Amino acid sequence: MKKFALIGAAGYIAPRHLRAIADTQNELVCAFDPNDSVGIIDSTFPNADFFIEFERFDRHIDKLRRKGFGVDFVSVCSPNYLHDSHIRFGLRSGADVICEKPLVLNPWNLDALEVIEKEYGKKIYNILQLRLHTTIVALKSRVDCELAKNPNKIFDVNLSYITSRGKWYFISWKGDVSKSGGVATNIGIHFFDMLLWIFGAPRQSRVHLLTPSSASGVLELTNARVRWFLSVDSMNLPKDCAKRTFREITIDGEAMEFSEGFTDLHTESYRDILNGGGFGTHDARASIELVHSIRNAPLAPLVGDYHPMCKG
């Protein structure tokens, strides 16, 4: 049984980490969040110590370590811009770290973390859950088979992802580009990681749309040309969409259904890490570099090839 500490216990994604720790038969020793709305802990680890002040949380972790009961893992579910600092804390505390996406906002933050990782002899793991989704794994296998026959094939890919958010989103840290990285980073990075994992490294990127609520562009990868559209604005949902979330990927005109199968992917990610696998800083780098370049790219004119949703 491994001992876990969790940072960001009141966050949106924290319940999936709590469930993953419980489902893998491990123990949450303590948790931290400046917000005390963390009653969700009762359903899995009611005896875990909880702190709303980081200084006291830090002291508690240090006391445990000095008594020989230090935590094995620190799970980081805090806002994106705090990941870097909280990962460093976990490593300094003698623990491996499991962090939500994005691992960091900027490539140079990743460079520094890799140095610190070696200094402390501990590992940083990133939750890249789509790499474990059965449909995505099957797609990669299919693409690999086709590329084995035709290494120069360029797949034609359309990615559309709209996940509606209310006014609160733009008041929270998620609406602040300096804290979230913007839409392309906050809701898009795991899709970009998936595309790079399947179709290879980026060769060219053009950005046609970049607003607080939406982003779109065309991405040329080693073996794919990708038109992508991401949004948190419900006005962008297709008229026939009955839900508030719309996911669609088409490959060479064929739609791929992967709306289901997301709920258990954090547990699968934890299980993979605990079994000696997991995705580290090297795996996370390509998508971090890509979203950083998208965030800072000049807008290209809406001519030639672009995602059809941009037209609206």
Image: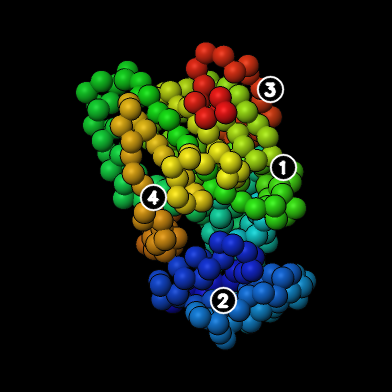
Residue 97 in the image: x percent, y percent? Answer: 56, 60
Q: Residue at x 50, y 79 (%)?
A: 44
Mark 4 Cα within 10 Å, few/some/many (few <14, many 20+)? few
Q: Are marks 2 and 3 in contact (CB under 8 Å)?
A: no
Q: Which mark is residue 40?
A: 2
In terms of depth relative to the viewer, which is nearer, 226 or 117? 226
Along the polypeptide, which appears first: circle 2 or circle 3?
2
Disc 4 marks a residue whose amino acid type is: Ser
Instruction: Mark yes or no: residue 110 visible.
Output: no
In terms of depth relative to the viewer, which is nearer, 194 or 273? 194
Q: Circle 3 sits on which residue?
A: 298
Residues at marks 2 and 1, CA–CA distance in whole angstroms: 29 Å
Q: Mark 1: which secondary structure?
A: helix
In terms of depth relative to the viewer, which is nearer, 24 or 34? 34
Q: Which mark is residue 228?
A: none
Mark 2 Cα within 10 Å, few/some/many (few <14, many 20+)? some
**259 to the left or right of 148:** right
Residue 30 in the image: x percent, y percent? Answer: 61, 77
Q: Mark 2: which secondary structure?
A: helix
Which quadrant of the view contains residue 29? bottom right
Residues at marks 3 and 1, CA–CA distance in whole angstroms: 16 Å
Along the polypeptide, which appears first: circle 1 or circle 4?
1
Q: Circle 1 sits on which residue?
A: 177
The correct choice, above or below, for 30 with respect to 80 in the image is below
Along the polypeptide, which appears first: circle 3 or circle 4?
4
Disc 2 marks a residue whose amino acid type is: Ile
Q: Circle 4 sits on which residue?
A: 259
Residue 86 in the image: x percent, y percent? Answer: 67, 59
Quadrant of image for the C terminus: top right
Q: Residue at x 35, y 24 (%)?
A: 155
Instruction: Mark yes or no: residue 244 visible.
Output: yes
